[in-house]
Amino acid sequence: MPEKHLENEHLMSEPSMPVPQGFFDRHPGKPHLSSFKQYEEMYKESIEHPEVFFAKMARENLSWSKPFTVPKVPVAAPFSANDGEPSAWFVDGELNASYNAVDRWAQKNPDKPAIIYEADEPGEGRIVTYGELLKQVCKLAQVLVNLGVKKGDTVAVYLPMIPEAIVSLMAIIRIGAVHSVVFAGFSSGSLRDRINDAHSKLVITTDESKRGSKIIETKKIVDDALKTADQVSNVIVFQRTGTKHVPWTEGRDLWWHEELAKYPSYFPPTPVNSEDPLFLLYTSGSTGKPKGIQHTTAGYLLGALLTTKYVFDVHEEDTIFTAGDVGWITGHSYVVYGPLLNGATTVVFEGTPAYPTFSRYWEIVDAHKVNQFYVAPTALRLLKRAGEKYVTPYKLDSLRALGSVGEPIAKDVWEWYNDNVGRGKAHICDTYWQTESGSHLICPLAGVTPTKPGSASFPFFGIDPAIVDPVTGKELKGNEVEGVLAVRNSWPSMARTIWGDYSRFMDTYQNPYKGFYFSGDGAARDKDGFYWILGRVDDVVNVSGHRLSTAEIEAALIEHRLVAESAVVGFPDELTGSAVAAFVSLKTKDVSNVDAIKKELILTVRKEIGPFAAPKLILLVNDLPKTRSGKIMRRILRKVLAHEEDQLGDISTLSNPDVVAHIIDVVKASR
Ligand code: PRX
């Protein structure tokens, strides 16, 4: 059962709010769906006849070089009863992802903006049209082919938020290769692990990158990673800052601009099978080793396309600004694929919400008349704290849908978003989903679904959620129930495997609750059938919308020469949602400079994983609470951190019960 209960549980019994009238007043045309009733009818069909529903959607919305005749196998649960294989979709069809995302729109109107690039420094951005995007994609595709990249090969992408990130993804999939984007905030060690796990032979990066006016030496990080990644034969480097000091390996490293200049501006797309892999994206799980979540072509494309279209009510004329990074799934689905597959214009923002001022998002919204804005609550909390004066001067009257993603959004933040950004005239869409789901699972549809602040509302088409009792594994039917969230059926954009580790995939998602896909989250369904996400029930923490594994941070800490043992847990943080606390016992008790050691430990995590994973709190303790079999009782650590010493339960079964009083003292002293 999730330990963290909803702060605002009483909200569940409050009535829902209708779609604001302002949404319709601001709409230049009509929303895709006319009513909640229409959603209910479509939803019913999507659950009762998924193969009919999604076949129709896939035919209407995607272009196929070879039409499919088999929409779905097998037809029942998320995983087949016999061998546990996940369902496959549109299995005999062929298509190309870049053709669907780029060519279709370039043919229709080459001058239409595909990308609005907002550089870190205001005023330094540019617009990339669909026609221009197609040319760049075709040129890079030929560079890749010439360097020996073949269909099915993986290519690592370590890039900041610049148009070339989209060009890279589209070029890779144009030739049927598989992209593996690594968030450019990851350390060289994490990058190396991901390059090696995916067997990537080529890496695309920049000379440097810039964020919040800070320079990051991206190429240097790549070089460090490649010291122990022998299979990488080439690195393509886009000149972002033009620095003179770029470490260079002749023969291996190639300049983006020099290579692209060698090729003509058209190169035909390679058709691939629906179920061929489209990309890998590494994410954290319960163990220290990150999982290469593998998505397939047609199913993923359809999920990203349909959710963008219906959840945010995106039309071809719209400009959507997803303030997420392409290094995470939100960037994949709602900066890159979703907007382009709908022929809309996507904003690629390189900077931070705080640079040069806390008005940066709102400047962008007004400058480009953004219609849909999508962000994580952590950024909203930052902006709320900064004050209304940064928002009020802006018009923000182009906005119709305001999305939230990555963590529960508290009522006060929801209201701040609604009042100050939406001005009561935009529809707030709290979208619940995951790297593994590929696209939204539970979310309102803009212009359609009534909302309750803090609830992700109802399932998207084709998602049949179940609340399961975590102890018995039985489904809890009806309303007013709480348990773990599972999905009863398969949906097109569901991940198909963990790259190279199918048994881990089954152990993580199928085996915990047979017959269901297990989400890893706790959830409740209230009296009106609204879903409320209660947070992870496993060893995953969401810090500032970044998904971290506590085991991965523990594995990093142990790299420090003085660390004997560590236990990492999440605790609530006003700004970042959750923060990381590391309880560490050292090999020696004879420590003169405690602060210096704490700093070293934080540095170790920054170096091993990346700055975003750094613990907020390091607590040096004599020992960790353990069961007689040696298992660390993290639950006790969480309770002590949450000031719930009175709810520790029976600690007499610990092998070292005395340590608890010591830990309480250490935590108190840290405040
Ligand atoms: O715990 C849930 C939380 O983020 C997890 C997925 O993280 P990741 O794969 O990195 O994808 C983040 C972007 C989709 C989920 O298991 N989460 C995501 N969206 C919400 C959420 N928790 C509450 N409300 C949400 N809207």
Image (cartoon, rainbow, N blue to C red):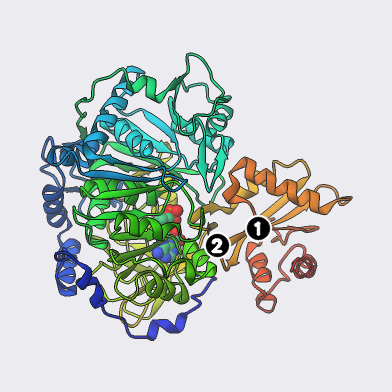
Q: Which of 660 and 533 is in front in this view?
A: 533
* Precedes in sequence: disc 1 or disc 2: 2
Does the CB distance between marks 1 and 2 fall below 8 Å? yes
| Displayed-image quarter of ligand 1 | bottom left
Residue 333 picture location, percent across and down: 33, 49
Q: In the rendered image of this protein, does residue 86 appear above or below residue 141?
A: below
Q: In which quarter of the image is residue 499?
A: top left
Q: Looking at the image, which residue is at 38% across and 55% down?
A: 364
- For the C terminus, the quadrant is bottom right
Query: Which amino acid does the dot numbered 1 rest on?
Result: Lys
Q: How far apart are marks 1 and 2 (CA)?
A: 10 Å
Q: Which mark is residue 616?
A: 1
Query: Which amino acid does the dot numbered 2 rest on?
Result: Thr
Neighbor class of circle 2 (other Cα within 10 Å; few <14, some 14-19, many 20+) is many
Residue 639 picture location, percent across and down: 65, 71
Q: Which mark is residue 576?
A: 2
